Amino acid sequence: MVFLDNDSFLTSLNKLYQATTKKGSVWVTMKRYVDSDSNFATKKAERKHPKLGEEENKCLVRATNGKKKISTIVLVKDIQSFQQSYKNILLVNLNNLKQVPKEKKKPSSSQRKMTP
Amino acid sequence: MYIADWDEFFDKSEQLYRSDPSKTRFSFKYRHVDAKVVLKVTNDRVNLKYQTDKENDFKRIDQLNNLFFGLTTAL
């Protein structure tokens, strides 16, 4: 599996979202990634029971639209910035969800403009 | 089966991950055409799903993202 670096992953993810506005879906999956799980040079039994605390845990993030697949590994030191950039991409692209008017408040379009 | 109650879904997701960190994954599906979001947490045995189409559930999606970013990189 080829892993993209964090930035190109986010760029590709953004493109993936933009390409599916007319049809299709995008799946983003994340799970823990441990090097020894994917190191097929070691024995299976060893892979199944990695020694605890020896490896830094990483976050594997994958995305697909059913055809194109992209993936990246996020290290602990990068998690904060990745988290923020990822959130921004979602904010931009999840623009089709239903707006629920707040209870007992007038439509706040004018109020929103005033707050920075 | 979808779980309707967010807090229940969130708590169960975290429990599921902690019970089996190497197998549990979190999948987030967004379908722009239908304006639909499905959040799924599974370890291939237990399957937890939550769906929404509302904008103010965004903070929940973000909450779960943060949970998994945190859990997967915790020691």
Image (cartoon, coloured by chain):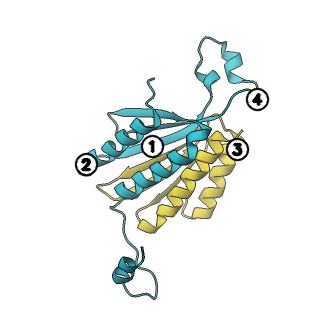
Chain colours: A cyan, B yellow
Name the residue tied to disc 3: B18
Residue under the point 46% across and 37% down: A6
Q: Residue A36 or B36: which is nearer the viewer? A: A36
SS class, disc 2: loop
Q: Are marks 2 and 4 on the same chain?
A: yes
Name the residue tied to disc 2: A23
Rendering quarter of residue A63:
top left
Identity, as a three-letter code, of the amino acid under mark 1? Val
Identity, as a three-letter code, of the amino acid under mark 2? Lys
Identity, as a three-letter code, of the amino acid under mark 3? Arg
SS class, disc 1: strand
Cα separation between marks 3 and 1:
20 Å
Mark 3 is surrounded, within 10 Å at the Cα level, by few (under 14), some (14 to 19) or many (20 or more) other residues, namely few
Quadrant that contains the C terminus of chain A: bottom left
Task: Please give left or right for residue A51 compared with residue A34 in the image.
Answer: right
Residue at the left extreme? A22
In the rendered view, tell whether residue A56 sits above or below residue A46: below
The subunit letter for the residue under badge 2 reads A
Name the residue tied to disc 4: A52
Q: Earlier in the sequence, mark 2 or mark 4?
A: 2
Cα separation between marks 2 and 4:
44 Å
In the rendered view, tell whether residue A6 sits above or below residue B32: above
Residue under the point 35% across and 77% down: A113
Q: Residue A91 or B52: which is nearer the viewer? A: A91
Residue under the point 65% across and 34% down: A57
